[in-house]
Amino acid sequence: MRKSISFLVVASLLILSILPVYATDFEGNENYYIEKCKVNPLPKADVDVCSEFNQYLKNKTDGISDRLKEIEDTLATIEDDIVKIQDTITSLNNQINEQNNQISYLEERIVILEASIEEKDQLIRERMYATQGLNNSNVYLTTLMGATTFKEFFSILSAISEITNFDYELMESLEADKVDVEESKQLLETQKQELEDLLELKEEAEALLLKQRAEYHEEWERQYEQSEQFKSDMEDIQDAIDAGSLNYPPSSSGSWGQPVASGTVTAVGWNYPDLGGGKVHTGMDIGAPVGTPLYAPANGVVIYMYTGCPTLGNGYGDSCAGGMGNNIVMIVQVDGTTYAVKYYHMQKTNAIGWSSGNFITVSKGDLVGYVGHSGSSTGAHVHIEVINLGSMSYSEAASLYAQKGGSFGLSTGTGALSYRCSIISWPCRETASDIFGYSLRQLLH
């Protein structure tokens, strides 16, 4: 495995250097010739073109190795460009697929060649055994002398010559196959090493992409919370608290309620499970169809709701509402402890009639909204965060939100890891999946 390879590979660079000119245009048609040249036995008409194709693969592989240094030099120019990184990953995926196809072709070719070697070797052994007796007993001479005419004599001589030529060509073919199989094995090992390099490049490129996306998300959230609308909503919350309009519902007891009617838990802990752990993920994701009901997980109060994003957003990278999409913030109490619970990427529906500065009391299991695909989202799901606010009262918790914003002063992105409840006291970030007792891929009904 290459110890240090730049992860920013533009896959097109892997195939653009000057290569030998071939009679056949293989570039972009590799899969066609792979299928054409792996048949057994190979039609005589295809022998030359397939031999040329095998040389093309060898030269192309050599070119990949020679250009790795050039690829590394692209790092400085695209490291901050998410679009170019995404394009690079797409190109890498194409290159990896092509490499896998070539490896499969070489593996099949080696099997065919080794079978051909064994068959020819056995045939040569049998012919040598058969002709040994002829040579020792002068049968060739006897056969020739048995001719009754010159025409018959030369006919027999010609037949003996053809047999000898066949044996010679057979042995030459055997030696060629042996050389071919060794070269194919060497090329196969090179191709496998290049595949490992490409996979490593892809993994590093994906890690960089996640890092860049995390930074973008943090910036989007900061910009969102600096917007005039958000600031106005926070002022309304504080005014309502000061006016004493915040009620105090009873604390829930026992376990937390299920937050969604049904779905599949797709992310737990503190990292995305399917992306190598490259990006901090501050909550739990539950995938479910758009329109699936969302419920209050405990008795509490809805202090904030945003429904200004389209239900079906523009996918990952949509900065609506700081990337959170339509969202809701609840302050709840369970067994005497106060928590903030946030749902992101909801449907564009104000299911509870919330308005700015209006606190809505909810009980465990009450409908509060629906699953959507809004904001920066890769698919329909709800993202859930839980923040432990200890012994804070409802008004103190709501006031903290109004002053500090969605993070309650506990940072976002990689900075959020420093505020986990496992390492500090409240206020702190809980592992949402642990709070609800859910595991990755768990089905909820």
Image: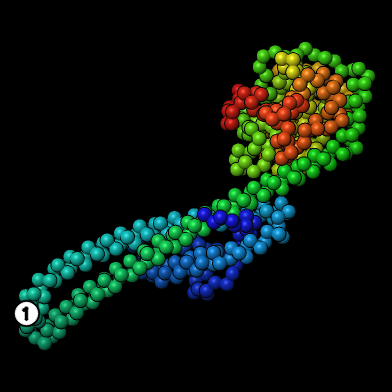
Q: Nearer the viewer, residue 41 or 340?
A: 340
Residue at the far bottom: name it: 150
Image position of 193 with respect to 270: above or below: below
Report crowding for label 1: few under 14, some 14 to 19, many 20 or more residues within 10 A (C-alpha): few
Q: Position of residue 415 (x, y in %)?
A: 74, 38
Identify the residue under disc 1.
142
Q: Is residue 144 left or right of residue 208?
A: left
Seen in the picture, residue 233 relative to 176 is either above or below; the reply is: above
Q: Which residue is nearer to you in this view: 175 or 389? A: 389
The residue located at (37%, 59%) in the rendering is 110
Image coordinates of residue 107 in percent, x first then y, are: 40, 56
Please tell me how many numbered marks the rendered image carries: 1
The quadrant of the rendering that contains the C terminus is top right
> The residue under label 1 is which amino acid type?
Thr
Q: Closest to the observer: 220 or 408?
A: 408
Quarter of the figure with residue 115: bottom left
- Label 1, secondary structure: give it: helix
Q: Quadrant of residue 413?
A: top right
Q: In the rendered view, does 358 fall on the left or right side of 260?
A: right
Residue 101 appears left or right of 227: left
Q: Is residue 108 above or below residue 274?
A: below
> Which percent across, then down, holds residue 409?
80, 32
